Amino acid sequence: MPVDLLSLAGFAFVSSITPGPNNTLLMLSGAHWGFRKSLPLILGIFIGFSVMLFLVGMGLGNAFRAWPALHLSLKGVSVAYLLWLAWKLARAASPDGSGSGEARPLSFLAAASMQWINPKAWFMAVTAMSVYVPVEAPAAVPVLVTAWFMLVGFPCCLAWFFFGTALRRFLTNPLRVKAFNFLMALLLLASIVLILF
């Protein structure tokens, strides 16, 4: 059964362009640190999600069906981590541009690892692979779905980053920065609620 690439592109676009933990962090990073400092975060999200998507396509998603408690545990860890991250965002100070600020984007490893506890990433990966990969498909099919999904979806995520970089001109005083950080924390909390319910 061939993969319906047009339908997959639609799913990849809609699921990638909507708010979620990755998009929130990308917009925040673009607004605060620009491209060069955010590159490890960007690559961590891209590579981490690609690997996760492929592994789910190779059968990892079946573990959730076999052990529902595993899925529930992962969801609990995910929510706890994202709540902690939202709290950190709400309390974050503005980087001062001189290098003395302690705040910085997530590292490559942290961003890649976060995909495994990101509930939206799991939803996207399990849905994409369960809908678009036949049960007895050869390994080439999950590779195709992963490549096509990232080709369509990743530019959507980057749009959030570049929107954040455009906001840098607006974030010119500490009050605006605090309001922006608080808004990003609320957006992250909203993404958790949307994913869970």
Image (cartoon, helix red, strand yellow):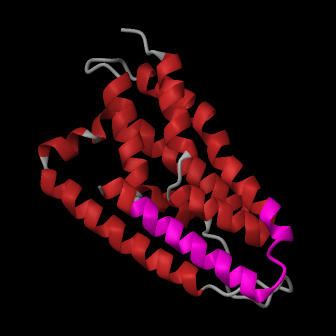
Q: Is residue 59 visible?
A: yes
Q: Residue at x 57, y 87 (%)?
A: 91
Q: Quadrant of the C terminus?
A: bottom left
In percent of width and height, residue 164 lies at 73, 61
Horizontal arrangement in the rendering, residue 74 relative to residue 88 (left or right): left
> Which residue is more in the foreground, 167 or 49?
167
Residue 55 placement: quadrant: top left
Q: Residue at x 13, y 49 (%)?
A: 67
Horizontal arrangement in the rendering, residue 93 relative to residue 75 (left or right): right
In percent of width and height, residue 179 lies at 66, 80
> Which residue is more in the foreground, 3 or 175?
175
Q: Residue at x 75, y 67 (%)?
A: 31
Residue 95 placement: quadrant: bottom right
Horizontal arrangement in the rendering, residue 122 relative to residue 152 (left or right): left
Is residue 47 highlighted in magenta? no
> Which residue is more in the foreground, 13 or 148?
13
Per the rendered image, the range of residues in magenta is 166-192
Q: Is residue 35 visible?
A: no
Q: Residue at x 67, y 53 (%)?
A: 160
In percent of width and height, residue 72 lies at 20, 59
